[in-house]
Image: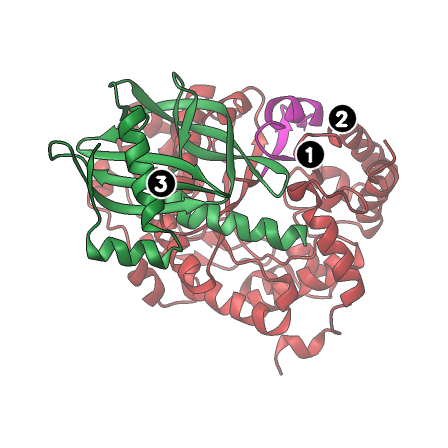
Chain colours: A red, B green
Amino acid sequence: MGYEDMFPPMDSRWHGNATKRFASPFVDKPHDRIDVDPIILSNAAVSCGYTIRDFYEHPTLGIHCVGYISHLFDLLPVTHWFFSLPWVTELGLKLVYKETLPPISTGPIYSTPEDVDKMHIPSKDELIKKQGQHATVPLFYNLYDYVAKNLPMTLVPISYGFDLVGAAAELIGVENFIMWTFTEPEAAQKLVQNYTDTAINGAEALADKYGMAMLIVGSVLGNNDIFSDEAVNDYSVKNMYRYVDGCFKHGAGPQIFYHLCGNHQTDYKMFKDGLMWSPFTVIHAGYQGRNPFPSKLLKETFEDKATCMGSVDTKLMIDNNPNKVYNQAKEQLLQGRDSKKGYILGTSCETPPYTIPGQMLALVKAARDFGTYGTW
Amino acid sequence: MVQVTIPADVKELIAKRGLKEADVLAVVNDAAASKKYIKKGNMGLAKKVIGDLTVYVMSDLSGSGTAVVKTAYAHKMKLGKIVNVMSETEWKTADGKAVAQGHVEIEYMTVKRNGPALVDVASNEAYVEEYLATKTLAAAEGLFEKKRA
C-alpha cells in the first residue's frame, strides 16, 4: 500500500479557493485574504499521527501530510518537503536520521584549505546518478513524481539551495568555518562557492525534468548573532546572488523564496541591493534581535522588490495562550498587509513539530480578521 | 548602413523563436543608426520594441561595417524604470561607458514587478540577456498568464 491510500482525496473546492488566494500577491488580483504560511514540515506528520523521524525518513509520506494538513488549517495550496542539508552527501558528508530532528551530519570531512582546493563539484549528471537514501536529485525526483501522480494540483517543483553558508560550513565543522572566516577567508569563500555551484547543478537537474524549479535559498548561519553585516554580505548575500543567477542561467526559477532565518538585526540592509529579484520573489525575515522581524521594517525595506512575508515568533506556536499568537499576528498584519507587491503571514521559521492546533487556528484567524482584502 | 548577415543556423533559430528576419534586420539597422546598443568585446547587443515584443539581436561586429547575427530573442514583458544598479559588467555602451548589472521594473498583463537586467544609467536603457529572456522571463510570462486566468 502506498501512502496515497491512507489519505482522503483533496477537496477541490478548498483547493480552488486557496489557489486563487495564493496567486493574489503575485498578480495584483486580491482574493479572499492574506495567505498564511507557517512553513509547516514535520508538524504535518505529527498532526497525522506520525513522528518527526517519519516525516524525514519517508518524504512521500511527509509531503502528503503537508498537503492534507494545509487543508485543515486553510494554508497554502502547494506542497513542499525539505530539510536543511541538501547536496551535502554528494560532497562527501554522511547523514543520519534522528528521532526528534531532521537528518544531521555525522561530522566534518575536511579540515584544511588544501582539502577545499581538491573538492570535486559534482556535475548535473553525477548528481542525477548519485545513489543512497539522501542523494538529493533522486530523492526529489521520487518525491515530485509521487506528488505529480497523487497530489498533482499541489505540485511546485522546488530546488533547495537552502542555507548556502551553513551547509557548506558542515563540511569543515561550523566552529571551524567561523574561525576560517577570520584566518582563511579565501578558503571559506571557496567552500561556500563550491557548495553553491553543486546546488546550481542540482537545480538544473530538477528544471530539466520539470520545466522549471522554484528556488528556496536562505541566510541562516549568516546572521547577526554570528557575523557582522559585512561578513553576512560576503559569505551569504553574494553567494545567494551567485546561486540564483546560476540557476537562472540553467533554466531554474523564476520563483524565488528568500528566507532570512534567525537574527538579522542590521544585516537585512545588505540583502536589498545584493540579491537578484525576479517577478515572483518572496522575502521572509525571521527575527530582529530576539523579536520577530517587524513587518513595518520589512515592508519599508523590501516592498519595492518583492512580496514580503512577515513573522510570528515560532515560540508562541507552542505557548498555551492562543491570544499571544493572535495579537502578534494582528500586529504584523497591520504593519505589512498593504505591502506594494503583496504580503504573506508566516512564522519566523518552520512551525515547531508540536505546534498546538489552537495556535495554528489563532494565526489563520488573525489573517481572516485583519487580512481580508477590501477591509482596509 | 551596416551590412547584416544572418547565417543559416541563426535563421533557423530565429524562425523557431517566432521572430521575423525583417525584424532582426530592423533591430540591427536602427541600433547602427542611433548608436544605441551595448558591446562586450566584438559582440554587440541591440534591442527594439516591435509590436508587443522587445526583440534583441546579438551580433559579431568585428568586421568593418558588418554585423554577423549570432542570436536573436524576444520577451513580451515591457521594461520600465531602472530599480537598482549593482556592480559593473563587461558590457559597455557604444561610446564606452560602463553597463551595470541591476534590476528594472517589468510589466506584464498590467502587473508590475522587478526583473534582472543590464542597465545603462546614462541613457536610462535596460537590456535583458538571452538566458533571462528565453528561460526566466519566458517562464514568468507563463506563470502570469496562468495565475491571472
Q: Nearer the viewer, residue A375 or B44?
A: B44
**Residues behind callouts 3 and 2 on a single chain:** no
Q: Is mark 1 on a helix, strand or loop?
A: strand
Q: Where is residue A146 in the image (x, y as percent from the top left)?
A: 56, 71
**Residues behind callouts 3 and 1 on a single chain:** no
Give the distance between the C-alpha atoms of the residues marked 3 and 2, in whole angstroms: 42 Å
Residue at (42%, 66%) from the top-left corner?
A138
Q: Quadrant of residue B85?
A: top left
Residue type for callout 3: Tyr
Which badge, 2 or 1, comes first in the chain's sequence?
1
Residue type for callout 2: Gln
The segment highlighted magenta reads A282-310
Q: Name the residue under label 3.
A: B56
Q: Mark 2 points at which residue?
A: A335
Q: Mark 1 points at which residue?
A: A310
B65 on left or right of A196 = left
**In the image, which disc is placed on residue A126?**
none
Q: State the quadrant of the N terminus of chain B.
A: top left
The image shows residue A86, relative to residue A9, as above or below, that is above
Q: Position of residue A364 (x, y in %)?
A: 81, 45
Residue A156 visible (yes or no):
yes
